[in-house]
Amino acid sequence: MSIASANWPSLMAFLACDTQWRVVGSMVGFMWVGLDWAGCTARLAHRLSSESIFADMAIMEDAALAVLNGGDD
């Protein structure tokens, strides 16, 4: 898999927030709710993040939620 150079900053920001997922547990199992955007903002505060990077991260979050919650293989 190759990543276009234009997408590299967004991917790195998304991966930097790998510990910022909100997860809810129940008797059925776990469900990933989404990224904790306040945590992501704090995590990325030292970086030169732009609105476009956060928009790209939201797209990656949606794709990841489908996989994490079993809706897409």
Image: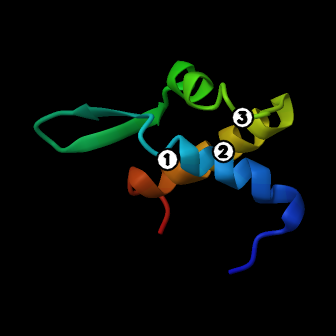
Report the amino acid beneath label 2: Ala
Residue at the image point whose x is 55% and y is 18% from the top: 38
Is 27 on the left-hand or right-hand side of 11? left
Mark found first going from the N terminus, 2 or 3: 2
The amino acid pointed to by label 1 is Leu
Q: Amino acid at mark 3?
A: Arg
Identify the residue position indicated by label 1 in the image: 65
Count of numbered circles on the image: 3
Residue indicated by mark 2: 13
**Residue furthest to the top:** 38
**Which label sits in the foreground, 2 or 1?**
2
| Residue closest to the eye, 27 or 64 | 64
Residue 70: percent from left, percent from top? 39, 57
Q: Secondary structure at mark 1?
A: helix
Vertical order, 12 against 24 (above or below)? below
Q: Which residue is mark 3?
A: 47
Q: Height in image: 46 above or below 19?
A: above
Find the distance from the CA under tag 2 to the CA under tag 1. 17 Å
Q: Quadrant of residue 11?
A: bottom right
How far apart, in angstroms, are the residues tagged by discs 2 and 3?
9 Å
In primary-sequence order, the first of circles 2 and 1 is 2
Proximity of marks 2 and 3: CB atoms separated by less than 8 Å: yes
